[in-house]
Amino acid sequence: MKRLGAFALAALMVAAALYARGAMDGDEEAVVEGGGVEQAGIVCAGDLAEVCSASGVALAATPAAGTTADALVAADDPADLGGAAWLVTEAWASLVVDERTRNREEPLFEVVGGPLASSEVVVAVWADRAAQLAERCGEPLEAAPGWRCLAEQSGSALQAGDRVRVAGPDVDSAAGLVVAASQAAGLLGATDFASNDFDQGDFRSLATALAGGQTAEPLRSMRSQGPGQVTAAGTIAARATNLSSTFGTIRPGTLQPAARADVVLVVPVGTDVSGDVRAALAGALLEAGWDRPADGPSGLPSGGVLAAIRTLWSQDR
């Protein structure tokens, strides 16, 4: 039954992509090298779809990262990927690999090569509200309020009459799981945490305050709706390039502990993608505001802990 469900989902993803792109005539070229798996097109996480389109690489499908992850965790065959490779943040790749290991499933998928691009998690806040929050939370005025401060102040009234509301990307998006992991680390004050730490103190109630603000485009909502609707928005630096708004000044700020989104390619074990495909995708990411691949730890927990974060954040979206 599990095989049938995973296969049906993968088949539906590929069929929909082929129909939408008019590729039934077989003009798409395979982008796989070696391994004997010859599937055309890249499966691209939904919130990275514009990057994939701009790269010129053939697309197989653009489902939400969580949708593809669920299919791969349950997969019985490498072909269940539904394409030559999956472009997604490394957090999701780690989740899939660790969940399959935990379930004692065969390791069918792996990350090939290093990251293509990186982007730090940031929080964008209306400048005047940031000053009020910093004063309330005892933080430096020049620093962006941290996740614990924002969670503790969620729902409280500000001097302008509006209440503190925090937005963030959907946890099932490529960037969303990374932002949620950053929020969890901020509430716990560390990056080396385990899922049983979620039962300590006020973590769950504060996590609910942050997870409840998930939306498809948090920064866009903030800019268009104003501070009366969104006080602060969690996002990645690559998405925080346009902060202009008629409502006032939006200030992006880094967070401690720091967290970073790295974009990678996931492939069936034993396969690879061509250097031209990697270069095209990396170039499109840089054009979209991502940075070149960063060195050092990303500040994210293990795939198993990321799965627990996803579950908890999903309950309140």
Image: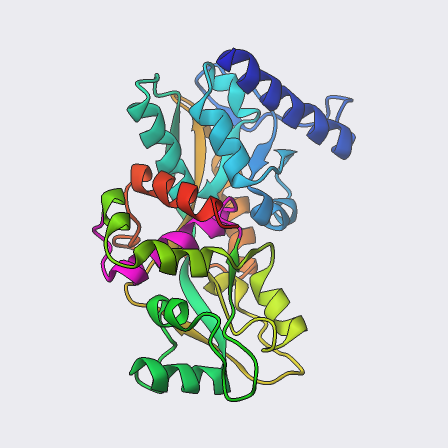
Residue under the point 52% across and 20% down: 80
Residue under the point 43% across and 56% down: 208
**Is residue 21 depicted above or below 300 in this figure?**
above
Q: Give percent across and percent down for residue 234.
A: 47, 64
Q: Give percent across and percent down for residue 2.
A: 49, 14
Residue 44 position by quadrant: top right
Q: Please name the predominant secondary structure of the magenta segment in the image.
A: helix
Q: Give percent across and percent down for residue 30.
A: 59, 25
Residue under the point 28% across and 41% down: 302
For this view, does 242 lie left or right of residue 258?
right
Q: Give percent across and percent down for residue 167.
A: 52, 63
254 or 117, nearer to the observer: 254
Count of numbered marks? 0
For this view, does 53 lie left or right of residue 299?
right
**Is residue 17 depicted above or below 53 in this figure?**
above
**Is residue 249 depicted above or below 58 in this figure?**
below
Magenta-drawn stretch contains 226: no
> What range is drawn magenta here?
170-193
Residue under the point 60% across and 77% down: 228
Camera sees residue 47: yes
**Is residue 192 depicted above or below 254 in this figure?**
above
Magenta-drawn stretch contains 187: yes
